[in-house]
Amino acid sequence: MEKVKYSEIVFDKLVSKMKKIVVDQFKFKESHVKYIPVDGLNGENLFEKSKNPLLSWYKDDYLFSYLDKIEMVKKEEEKEGLSIKKMIHEPFKMVVKDYMREGGISGSSVTVEGRICSGSIQIGDNLFTIPNYDVPFIRAIECQGQLVKFATVGDYVKIGLGNIDISKISKDTILSSIEQPIKLVNKFKAQILVNSSNIPVIKGTNAIMYINNNQESVYIKKIKMKKIKNPENNKIHYKRTTIIPKNTTAEVMIQLHDRRRLPLETYMKHRPFGRFILQHDAEIIASGVVLELL
């Protein structure tokens, strides 16, 4: 804040920009986000209320006063909470980080390892692999150097597989529940935040999408019309949008080229499979989240 002479106007502009990212894009609750002007170089508004006359316009908490008011959730309580229980009961998903043929656990011909993203597994379960669509079964599970009968979300495991050839496994292969495998889609609705002003983001814009260690060639197929409220009669009408300016969020439809399909989930359902960035000519032009699979 010292560089802009503690300007209230500049602070309000920064708050507005951050809200678009933190609240609109990443779906944080606005009541859980606090914006505090501070000067780290001179210690203004950090440990005590600033007495600088240039900051007299700010009447709220200083940084450490606000931090002291935050209620901390104990890890034990959080672990036993409903959110963890929900993740355990979700369908199994895991991205392969490494694999081996020789020296597999319990004599397995193929051993893979990675962290379980959701759900749980046990010995004997059948799995589904993407993108090769094989159906191996679990011979053995190793967690923290010990053989176990089952493992759950958050565990980093080695899994001994049967009924699969090593040539069908690679890094970034996705293992999922055979009853509810992760969906492969060619197009989806997303909310994006445009970062670049050098490259116009319009209908038909081509880009490389990076998501969960995958990259695919995509294009913007459709840009949703903006809702505009008439202040005189409170009626809502729609305005067609042809270009998405920098630092602006918009709802779009994204499609993969050549009828290719990609494993995706909505951001609200499973974050690692629902957030992405778009790159064009070595420049990141936008980041976004998946809203709906089509």
Image: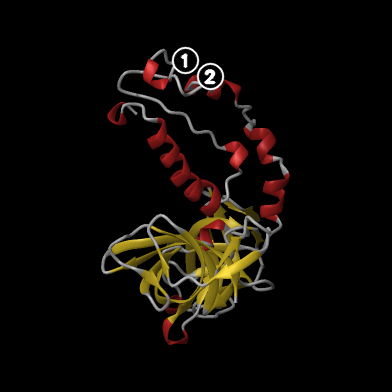
Q: Badge 2: few (under 14), some or many (20 or more) residues near its Cα, within 10 Å? A: some
Colour convention of the picture: secondary structure
Residue 109 image point, x, y percent? 49, 71
Q: Which residue is mark 2?
A: 65
Instruction: Please provide percent x and percent y for residue 95.
Output: 50, 63
Query: Which one is in front in this view, the residue at disc 2 or the one at disc 1?
Result: 1
Q: CA distance from mark 2 to mark 1?
A: 9 Å
Q: Quadrant of residue 172?
A: bottom left
In the picture, the disc for residue 207 is none
Q: Does residue 14 show up?
A: yes
Residue 106 in view (yes/no)? no
Q: Nearer the viewer, residue 181 or 199?
A: 199
State the image coordinates of residue 59 (x, y, percent, origin top left).
52, 21
In this view, the residue in front, 171 or 237, is 237
- Quickly name the residue at label 1: 49
Extreme-bottom residue of the structure: 258
- The local secondary structure at tag 1 comes to loop
Disc 2 marks a residue whose amino acid type is Ser
Q: Secondary structure at mark 2?
A: helix
Q: Is residue 80 above or below residue 214?
A: above
The front one of 21 and 263 is 21
Residue drawn at (53%, 19%) of the image: 65
Q: Quadrant of residue 178?
A: bottom right
Q: Quadrant of the N terminus?
A: top left
Residues at marks 2 and 1 touching, judged by CB atoms closer than 8 Å: yes
Q: Is 223 situated left or right of 236 in this image?
A: left
For residue 244, which quarter of the picture?
bottom left
Mark 1 neighbour density, 10 Å: few (under 14) some (14–19) many (20 or more)? some
Mark before the other along the chain sequence, 2 or 1: 1
